[in-house]
Image (cartoon, grey):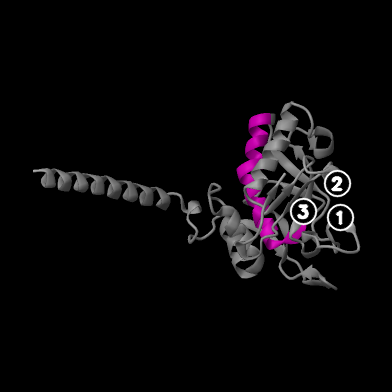
């Protein structure tokens, strides 16, 4: 009798486990961004593997271009640059129109992986937080540039910056449709909606970029958010400050 009861109990447990596994599989099918082997879709919600897939684009220019094309992002190819240890061969510049709604001031050229990451950031974080907290969408993003042949900190020795390969961008501020300008330097501190907006979009960038540095990191970043894709092939360390 006990053996029969144990067998029935084991069957019940197995059935429950099977149901849980099937439910998990069904749930993941509806959330491809949470699976490592599915194609990256810039229009999907940010998932567990979105950042890794974006970082992997740093070594796969054809795939990066395909991802931008599928998402309806308009762009122009930039000619390759070679400057000693610096340069890039995967540069793109955003073009007006298409799926994106913001412009960059001045016009932005960056690596394709950074452009793809910026598009997701715009859709999933910047515009959402702007409408929620500030009551107006963002129409322009101000920046201090992407490509710059220099080492980290601008010294003569040390590790080369991600700017040296156009795999980074420094964001200075945001212009809203109602004319307001939200600047990192003037609006980061405080408890108002402008500061909350900047902190939230920083946090949103942390889910997409390998490195996100803000005024919370050090004085050198007091006036901008540094965003970069330092993980080659989707592997490497991450930083969010």
Left or right: 123 with respect to 226? left
CB under 8 Å between discs 3 and 1: no
User: Does dot 3 land on a helix, a strand or a loop?
Assistant: strand
Q: Residues within 10 Å of mark 3 (few under 14, many from 20)?
A: many
Residue assigned mark 2? 220
Q: Residue at x 33, y 50 (%)?
A: 21
Q: Residues within 10 Å of mark 2 (few under 14, many from 20)?
A: few
Q: Tell which of 142 and 240 is nearer to you.
A: 240
Residue 132 lies in the magenta-colored region: yes
Residue assigned mark 1? 153
CB under 8 Å between discs 2 and 1: yes
* Residue 240, percent from left and from top: 69, 46
Spatial separation of the CA atoms under disc 2 and disc 1: 9 Å
Give the mark nearer the N terminus: 3 vs 1. 1
Camera sees residue 97: no
Q: In the rendered structure, find residue 169 and report the number of the disc placed on it.
A: 3
Front label number (3 vs 2): 2
Which quadrant would the N terminus be assigned to in this image? top left
Which quadrant would the C terminus be assigned to in this image? top right
Spatial separation of the CA atoms under disc 3 and disc 1: 15 Å
The stretch in magenta equals 109-133
Q: Residue at x 82, y 71 (%)?
A: 85
User: Does dot 1 land on a helix, a strand or a loop?
Assistant: helix
Tell me: residue 91, above or below residue 124.
below
Furthest toward the front, the residue is 2
| Majority SS type along the magenta span | helix
């Amino acid at each position: 009798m006990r053996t029969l009861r144990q067998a029935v109990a084991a069957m019940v447990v197995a059935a429950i486990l099977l149901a849980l596994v099937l439910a998990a599989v069904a749930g993941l099918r509806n959330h491809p961004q949470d699976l490592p082997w599915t194609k990256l879709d810039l229009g999907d919600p940010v998932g567990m593997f979105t950042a890794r897939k974006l970082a992997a684009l740093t070594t796969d220019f054809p795939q990066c271009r395909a991802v931008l094309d599928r998402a309806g992002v308009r762009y122009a190819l930039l000619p390759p640059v070679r400057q000693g240890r610096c340069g890039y061969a995967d540069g793109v510049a955003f073009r007006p129109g298409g799926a994106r709604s913001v412009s960059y001031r001045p016009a932005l050229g960056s690596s394709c992986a950074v452009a793809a990451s910026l598009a997701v950031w715009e859709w999933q974080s910047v515009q959402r937080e702007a409408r929620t907290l500030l009551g107006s969408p963002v129409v322009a993003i101000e920046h201090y540039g992407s490509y710059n042949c220099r080492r980290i900190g601008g010294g003569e020795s040390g590790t080369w910056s991600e700017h040296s390969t156009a795999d980074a961008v420094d964001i200075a501020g945001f212009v809203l449709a109602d004319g307001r300008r939200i600047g990192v330097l003037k609006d980061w501190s405080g408890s108002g909606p402008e500061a909350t907006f900047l902190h939230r979009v920083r946090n949103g960038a942390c889910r997409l970029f390998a490195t996100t540095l803000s005024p919370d990191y050090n004085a050198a970043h007091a006036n901008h958010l540094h965003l970069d894709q330092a993980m080659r092939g989707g592997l490497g360390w991450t930083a969010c400050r």
